[in-house]
């Protein structure tokens, strides 16, 4: 972690007891409490990570010392906690999760009163309080209280059902395989789907913060068991969640796993049929497929920097009701303008029921792009110069620098090269109309980056 920076692309992240220590987290809690102010009511919960309960106690200490009241939920998905902030009209919240990072990491997300993560400007305010020791500790007579907040997961489930047609979904008797990543995705979604009339098979559904089934990031190469299970049991669809269940990656009945762009495009197409001219928000990491789908549906596409905070805040500013990311995050604002894996699953089932088409058929209707991803390790202090050097090499191409460097080629292929905001790596996202071309783009630009890095 940088000495003067707490927040990355998506909250605070760090190695447990190395970068993220109990002492630091108490201070973060106090800084967040100072930011909100004495007497404010904040929700608190965590995902399955083994360090979650430890950090929850540290955060509670910091928040109550600054005079805030804590409404403690315990284990819950990030979108369930975000919904609880709105539902109970609380002032905000803290979610302890490192999302897709491996088990040795944990993190802190700060939520505003609308259930959306705090803006980058608000994060800067919290950092200013933290680094300049502007913490406000209240007198002993004004220390905040910790209260339990039961029923959050059930309330969240009920809210999702209000945005789909449960009877129509139930009439189709869908069979869904849920890969819960040994985390909080298994608390709500399997029950929700059964209540929607689906037959549900679960894998990796026991809570285990060591993530024995697979790592928390749902990637095609790590979802082989999901794919085989869907085929073996004859399911209609499979869904895999990340560690805090705000992202979902889907698999069709044939066992084919799709990046988030393809399923997001299914949602966009149906949404624009019912809401012509609507605004769709997506980061520059998204595929050209999203652009094609929005244009075909006569919607308005708004590109943003990468990061769920930026997508949510842009949706709020632009009054847009739908956003999405290539990593499986879909933001459905009629429910809440945040990534929500269970809501996305319900939306897709609703579309399959409405259109009477399988996920395979819905995706086959799309323009076909092949997406390949890669990454290389890069120390945080070399990210800026590496990005500048690669830009100098490619600036004569059709290039965007909204976030990182994205290059569009005349044959319709493209590659985005950008530094991660949460890890010491550079990420590469390539797409083309054939898989070999996409793979070669990743290989070629990985080599270029490594060559530049070796000279720095």
Image (cartoon, rainbow, N blue to C red):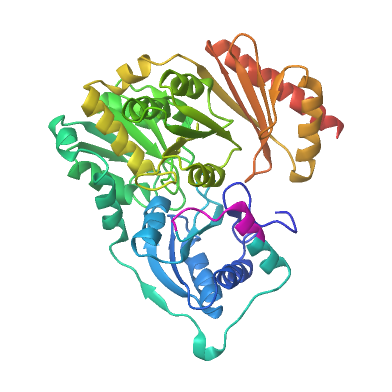
- 311 versus 238 height, above or below: below
Looking at the rendering, in which quadrant would you find the C terminus? top right
Question: Going 45% across and 39% down the picture, which residue do you hit?
Answer: 320
Would you identify the image quadrant in which residue 276 lies? top left
Image location (x, y in percent) of residue 287: 53, 24
- 166 versus 454 height, above or below: below
State yes or no: residue 348 in magenta.
Answer: no
Q: Is residue 322 visible?
A: yes
- 228 versus 65 height, above or below: above
Q: Nearer the viewer, residue 247 or 37?
A: 37
Image location (x, y in percent) of residue 24: 64, 67
Q: Which residues are magenta?
A: 114-124
State yes or no: residue 122 in magenta.
Answer: yes
Question: Going 41% across and 40% down the picture, which residue do you hit?
Answer: 321
Residue 413 shown left or right of residue 183 in the figure: right
Image location (x, y in percent) of residue 222: 46, 32
Would you identify the image quadrant in which residue 175 lies? top left
């Amino acid at each position: 972690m940088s000495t003067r920076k707490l927040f990355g692309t998506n909250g605070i992240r760090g190695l447990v007891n190395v970068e993220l220590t109990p002492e630091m987290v108490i201070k973060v809690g106090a800084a967040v409490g100072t930011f909100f102010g004495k007497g404010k009511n904040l929700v608190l919960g965590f995902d399955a990570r083994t360090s979650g309960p430890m950090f929850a106690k540290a955060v509670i200490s910091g928040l109550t010392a600054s005079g805030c009241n804590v409404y403690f939920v315990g284990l819950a998905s990030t979108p369930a906690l975000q919904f609880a902030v709105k539902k109970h009209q609380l002032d905000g919240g803290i979610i302890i999760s490192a999302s897709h990072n491996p088990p040795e990491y944990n993190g802190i997300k700060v939520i505003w009163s609308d259930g959306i993560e705090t803006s980058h400007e608000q994060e800067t305010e919290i950092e200013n309080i933290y680094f300049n020791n502007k913490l406000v500790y209240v007198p002993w007579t004004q220390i905040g209280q910790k209260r339990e907040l039961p029923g959050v997961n059930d309330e969240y489930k009920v809210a999702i059902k209000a945005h789909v047609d449960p009877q129509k979904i139930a009439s189709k008797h869908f069979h869904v395989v849920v890969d819960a990543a040994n985390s909080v995705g298994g608390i709500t979604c399997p029950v929700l789907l059964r209540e929607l009339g689906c037959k549900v098979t679960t894998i990796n559904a026991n809570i285990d913060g060591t993530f024995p089934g697979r790592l928390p990031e749902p990637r095609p190469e790590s979802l082989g068991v999901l794919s085989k299970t869907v085929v073996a049991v004859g399911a209609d669809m499979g869904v895999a969640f990340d560690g805090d269940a705000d992202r979902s990656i889907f698999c069709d009945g044939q066992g084919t796993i799709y990046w988030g762009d393809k399923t997001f495009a299914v949602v966009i197409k149906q949404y624009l049929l019912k809401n012509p001219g609507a605004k769709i928000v997506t980061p520059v990491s998204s595929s050209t497929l999203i652009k094609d789908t929005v244009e075909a549906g006569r919607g308005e596409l708004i590109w943003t920097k990468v990061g769920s905070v930026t997508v949510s805040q842009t949706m709020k500013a632009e009054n847009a009701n739908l956003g999405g990311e290539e990593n499986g995050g879909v933001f459905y604002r009629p429910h809440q303008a945040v990534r929500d894996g269970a809501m996305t699953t319900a939306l897709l089932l609703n579309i399959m029921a409405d259109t009477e088409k399988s996920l395979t058929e819905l995706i086959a209707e799309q323009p076909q792009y092949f997406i390949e991803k890669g990454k290389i390790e890069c120390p945080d202090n070399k990210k800026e110069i590496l990005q500048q050097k690669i830009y100098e090499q490619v600036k004569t191409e059709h290039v965007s620098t909204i976030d990182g460097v994205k290059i569009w080629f005349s044959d319709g292929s493209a590659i985005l090269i950008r530094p991660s905001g949460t890890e010491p790596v550079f990420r590469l996202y390539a797409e083309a109309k054939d898989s070999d071309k996409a793979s070669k783009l990743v290989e070629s630009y990985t080599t270029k980056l490594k060559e530049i890095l070796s000279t720095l």
